[in-house]
Image (spheres, grey):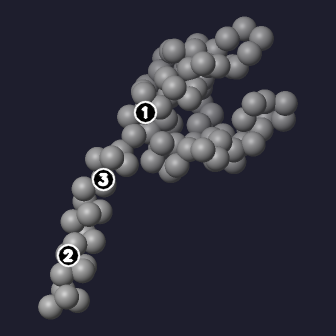
Amino acid sequence: MKVRILPATLLSLSLLAIPVMAQDGAASFKTRCAPCHGDQGQGKPNGAPKVAGSTKDVSTVLTKGGLAKAPHIKPMNTLNAAQISAISAYVKTLK
């Protein structure tokens, strides 16, 4: 009977974690991206480029790095996959 309880318990615990793992793209953008790229992704002169309306794949830049001499030349290792997806989706909504 213990063998049957363990999988059910693990499944229940994983379902409880789903809302915690879900990241709000706007909140993540505000805390991690906006200080350099601006609240609306408008960019900053002599700083980070505009990301609003960009056709670049944000998730690729965050996971693999960006252009040479850019702050994102290296990947943002502190972000998990859910955060990267949420931020990428949010950036697509910026105009």
Above/below status of 43 relative to 83 = above
**For the residues carrying marks 1 and 3, which lies nearer the camera in this image?**
3
Q: Which residue is mark 3?
A: 18
Q: Which residue is mark 1?
A: 25
N-terminal-most mark, 1 or 3? 3
Above/below status of 15 relative to 56 = below
Alpha carbon distance from label 2 to label 3: 16 Å
x and y percentages locating residue 63 in the rendered image: 64, 47
Would you say the residues marked 2 and 3 are in contact, meaning their CB atoms lie under 8 Å apart?
no
The secondary element bearing badge 3 is classed as helix
* Residue that protrudes farthest toward the left in the picture: 1
Q: Residue at x 52, y 49 (%)?
A: 80
Q: Nearer the viewer, residue 66 or 54?
A: 66
x and y percentages locating residue 81 in the rendered image: 50, 50
Specify few, some or many for label 1: CA neighbours under 10 Å numbering under 14, 14-19, or 20 or more: some
x and y percentages locating residue 83 in the rendered image: 48, 42
Residue type of the residue flagged with mark 1: Gly
Alpha carbon distance from label 2 to label 1: 31 Å
Q: Residue at x 77, y 38 (%)?
A: 73
Q: Which residue is mark 2?
A: 8
Q: Residue at x 25, y 59 (%)?
A: 15
Residue type of the residue flagged with mark 3: Ile
N-terminal-most mark, 2 or 1? 2
N-terminal-most mark, 2 or 3? 2
* Left/right of residue 50 with respect to residue 26 in the rendered view: right
Q: Which mark is residue 13?
A: none
The secondary element bearing badge 1 is classed as helix
Q: Residue at x 50, y 36 (%)?
A: 88
Specify few, some or many for label 3: CA neighbours under 10 Å numbering under 14, 14-19, or 20 or more: few
The secondary element bearing badge 2 is classed as helix
Alpha carbon distance from label 1 to label 3: 15 Å
